[in-house]
Amino acid sequence: NEIKIFSPATVANVACGFDVLGFCLDSVGDDMVIRKTDKKGIFITKIEGGFDLPYETELNVAGVSALAMYEAIKPDFGFEIEINKKIKPGSGIGSSAASAVGSVFGMNELLGRPYNKTQLTEFAVKGEALASKCEHADNLAPALFGGFTLVKSMSPLEILQIPSPNDLYATIIHPQIEVKTSEARAILPKEVPLSHAITQWANFGSLIHALHTSDFELIKRSLNDVIVEPYRSQLIPHYYEVKSEVIRVGALGAGISGSGPSIFSLSKGLETANNVKDAMHKVYAKTGINFDIHVSKIN
Ligand code: HSE
């Protein structure tokens, strides 16, 4: 009647895949407990982690996605949700997505898995929308499916799982400044020049091909973003310095993680991923901004 789950952090966009591509991290995430109760309804009963998050079900991301699923099933019992939030809200590694996904995943397990992962993503979109003020699934899908995912369409929701090379690692630095997704979206242009669109979809197609064929050299040449990065990079101190330093020590490339301020980098092999960690550390240690860095294998 109770399940403990790990709800992983995720990196959305992955440079050229704004709003559609994402991957899952295995070393960072929230712990959650979902419990069946006799009392009908969805109740957030515990929030740990030191962040100021609401207990009201309708105002809590995990609560809203749970309610969406609950209303679809209308059971004669309820659920309690405990959240041990380890992913800082506003960090750019899918904090709201982890909450939104965790509650519905846990409920689905307790109910004997009536829904598939795409259907769970659909419920979780409701919670995610509360946090970012728009419906996007590029953090939700990798949190539920693992690895790399591509959101082929939102309506109807269609998610593709993309394979990735065995030896692919991510290094993520999280500078502890807050960038709100809604604000990071508001500064983006509504239209893009055709020449930029062409570059972007060539890179995006190439990246997907490179992931399928384990072509690290092509991953390296495809990790570019000419549409979003020029705007959002202004919100992240020392962004371009981090990027050039990680590439200098052997990373395949780097980009803004989701809406920032986290910066992700991809590497072939753990050793390079750790060198990237040191390089990120060096750049940020002199800024006076607090930060943390994670290395994660992409499965
Ligand atoms: N694709 C979304 C964005 C992810 O970049 O705004 C937000 O986490």
Image (cartoon, rainbow, N blue to C red):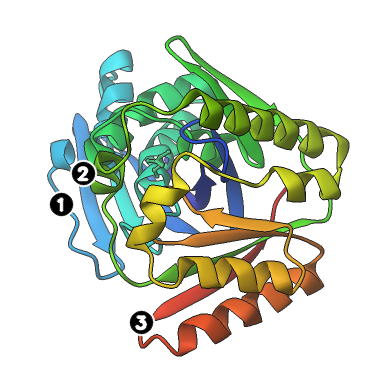
Residue drawn at point x = 66 percent, y = 42 percent:
147
Spot the residue most to the top. 156
Q: Secondary structure at mark 1?
A: loop
The x, y position of residue 76, in whole percent, is 25, 21
Lower sequence index among marks 1 and 2:
1
Residue drawn at point x = 70 percent, y = 42 percent:
222
State the separation of the CA atoms marked 3 and 1.
27 Å
Q: Nearer the viewer, residue 99 or 279?
A: 279
The x, y position of residue 281, in whole percent, is 55, 82
Q: Is residue 67 above or below residue 262?
A: above
Q: Secondary structure at mark 2?
A: loop
> Does any atom of ligand 1 lie closer than 8 Å to the CB of label 2?
no
Q: Are marks 3 and 2 in contact (CB under 8 Å)?
A: no
Quickly name the residue at label 3.
289
The x, y position of residue 135, in whole percent, is 33, 27
Q: Is residue 160 above or below residue 12?
A: above
Give the mark toward the camera: 3 or 1: 3
Picture quadrant of residue 234: bottom left
Q: Nearer the viewer, residue 149 or 58?
A: 149
Q: Secondary structure at mark 3?
A: loop
Residue drawn at point x = 81 percent, y = 33 percent:
212
User: Residue 114: in sight, yes or no?
Assistant: no
Lower sequence index among marks 3 and 2:
2
Residue type marked 3: Ile
Quickly name the residue at label 1.
54
Q: Nearer the viewer, residue 158 or 178?
A: 178
Quickly name the residue at label 2.
60
Q: Are marks 1 and 2 in contact (CB under 8 Å)?
A: yes
